[in-house]
Image (cartoon, rainbow, N blue to C red):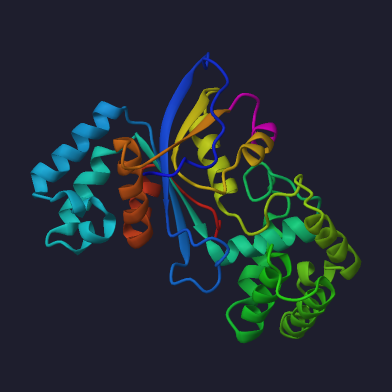
């Protein structure tokens, strides 16, 4: 027996106006394990196919390349002989009907440090709606990496803001600033490192410990990815109704807060579905996996105006 689907924010009634329905899935998501995963990026893919169009595309893919049912996953798909031809055909079939948002996990953490600890946290943070601190994050990312002191700095931040913190807040703040100081000796002129203040950091941690829900979850990249996806599809004033593979991070409370920072009416709602039941989500899942595993595919998507890099690097 299947468990009930978690998350989502279905529309309360009929969705009026110009509406586009998209189906979404991700690849490479590893929860809060953003530093020690074998996957350096997360891809969030979306398609605006109808159910019948998705069924036809999957059937054509299986017929044309003699795929068995279990080979629709990107791992099986890309290991087959002639995978390059299959990828080219698949991407061409989605031209104008798909979008992929790519999140560099390490850079995402840098934006979290900047947005959470140097300004008022917002659900708009990490998206094109809040760009004023992006140059500072890019400068730190470029100047700080690579190096053991860089890895220690990011790890200390993760340990400090994760929900199940390793040790008392006071100790994790001390470790974070010790790591900041070590990195600053190598990158002395960085504005972000210089601006970090223990009093402000402790105040933010207190709000997190008190479950202040106005602060977006610090280690959750799916929310800004969804925001960017909605912004892409809402171009021209359309409302976006999302059908998403189950993702427990996309709770009704968080989605409501995200709705409030997006342009009025942009996110009409989000319905959780089981990918086994929705061929549109199956296509999105395959696209996300292909884009994550093949940088050349991400380049093709960018050339077609269908892809975006969250890192901005």
Q: Position of residue 298 (x, y in %)?
A: 37, 54
Give coordinates of residue 131: x percent, y percent.
68, 48
Which quadrant of the rendered structure holds the C terminus? bottom right
Quarter assignment of residue 8? top right
Query: Residue 222's x, y, as percent?
Result: 55, 50
Q: Position of residue 58 (x, y in %)?
A: 20, 40
Vertical side of 293 occupied by 243: above or below = above
Q: Is residue 298 above or below residue 37?
A: above
> Which residues, given as a range, are shown in magenta?
258-266
Q: Is residue 211 magenta?
A: no
Tell me where residue 114 sits by quadrant: bottom right
Q: Does residue 306 appear anywhere in the picture?
A: no
Residue furthest front in the image: 1
In what quadrant of the picture does the N terminus appear? top left
User: Image point 24% across, 42% down: which residue?
Assistant: 92
In magenta stretch: residue 261: yes
In the displayed structure image, the side of residue 304 where residue 146 appears, left or right: right
């Amino acid at each position: 027996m299947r468990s009930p689907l978690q998350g989502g924010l279905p529309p309360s009634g009929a969705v009026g106006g110009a509406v586009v329905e998209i189906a979404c899935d991700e690849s490479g998501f590893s929860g809060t394990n953003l530093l020690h995963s074998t996957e350096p990026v997360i891809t969030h893919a979306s398609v605006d196919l109808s159910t019948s169009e998705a069924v036809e595309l999957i059937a054509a893919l299986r017929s044309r390349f003699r795929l068995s049912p279990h080979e629709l996953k990107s791992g099986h798909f890309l290991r087959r002989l002639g995978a390059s031809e299959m990828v080219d055909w698949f991407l061409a079939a989605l031209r104008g009907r798909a979008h992929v948002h790519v999140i560099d996990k390490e850079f995402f953490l840098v934006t979290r440090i900047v947005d959470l600890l140097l300004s008022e946290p917002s659900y708009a943070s990490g998206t094109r709606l809040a760009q004023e601190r992006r140059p500072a994050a890019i400068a730190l990312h470029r100047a700080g990496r690579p190096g053991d002191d860089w890895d220690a700095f990011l790890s200390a931040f993760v340990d400090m803001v994760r929900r199940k913190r390793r040790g008392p807040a006071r100790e994790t703040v001390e470790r974070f600033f010790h790591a900041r100081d070590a990195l600053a000796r190598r990158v002395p002129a960085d504005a972000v490192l210089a601006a970090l203040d223990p009093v402000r950091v402790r105040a933010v941690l207190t709000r997190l410990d008190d479950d202040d829900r106005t602060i977006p979850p610090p280690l959750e990249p799916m929310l800004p990815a969804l925001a960017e996806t909605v912004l892409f599809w809402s171009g021209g004033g359309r409302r976006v109704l999302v059908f998403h593979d189950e993702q427990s991070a996309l709770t009704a409370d968080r989605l409501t807060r995200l709705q409030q920072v997006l342009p009025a009416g942009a996110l009409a709602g989000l319905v959780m579905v089981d990918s086994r039941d929705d061929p549109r989500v199956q296509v999105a899942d395959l696209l996300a996996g292909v884009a994550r595993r093949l940088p050349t595919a991400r380049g093709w998507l960018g050339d077609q105006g269908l892809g975006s890099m969250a890192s901005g690097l």
